[in-house]
Amino acid sequence: QVQSFFNGGPEGVAHTDISDPFCPRITGQIPHVAKERGIALHTGGTYVCMSGPTFETKAEIRLLMALGMDYVGMTLAPECKLAREKGMCYVPLLMPVNYGAGLGDEIISHDNTVRMVETMKRDFVSLLEGLLPVLEERGDCMCSRAVSFL
């Protein structure tokens, strides 16, 4: 799994600031688009990226909750770092598909995950369609300036 474009290869080594990893310009538009389209949206929270494709254990979920994590997933961290290194605007749109091992009565399985995605897909696509004009324009944000030599 690639963790950086600047880890000593032809591009050399570069340390990229990802203190605020998501594009503030696009992030600021998401609540407006969701409201316009009548889509329920939860903003904020802390995400932790865990190694997949297995789901977390009950003990891991309890530990992550104790640390203040709100969302657990198997992606996002590598992608947001790589997008920042390439000067791309990037935001996460999460589809929470379960409450974590041991937190609910549901069985956490691949099939249940796919079913939950299906129930949220229409709103997710609508949100993306509403964001297209924002995504198409190149705004003045820090994303393109995170690596000084781009």
Image (spheres, helix red, strand yellow):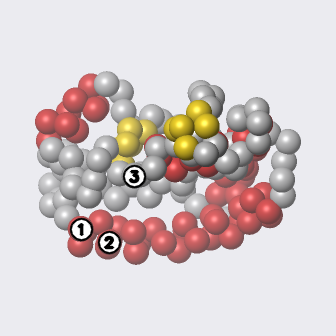
| Callout 1 amino acid | His
Nearest the camera: 145 or 49?
Answer: 145
Left/right placement of residue 13 relative to residue 29 reads left
Left/right placement of residue 1 relative to residue 146 reads left
Q: Which residue is mark 2?
A: 114
Nearest the camera: 139 or 128?
Answer: 139
The answer to which of marks 3 and 1 sits earlier in the sequence is 3
| Callout 3 amino acid | Gln
| Residue pictured at 53% horizontal, 74% vertical | 122
**Camera-nearest label, 3 or 1:** 3
Q: CA distance from mark 3 to mark 1?
A: 22 Å
Residue farthest toward the front in the current orientation of the protein: 10
- Name the disc covering residue 53, or none: none
**Camera-nearest label, 2 or 3:** 3
Graded by Cα atoms within 10 Å as few (under 14), some (14 to 19) or many (20 or more), the crowding at tag 2 reads: few
| Residue pictured at 21% horizontal, 55% vertical | 54
Q: CA distance from mark 2 to mark 3?
A: 24 Å
| Callout 2 amino acid | Val
Where disc 1 sits, the SS reads: helix
Q: Which residue is mark 1?
A: 110
- Name the disc covering residue 1, or none: 3
Q: CA distance from mark 2 to mark 1?
A: 6 Å
Mark 2 touches mark 1? (CB < 8 Å):
yes
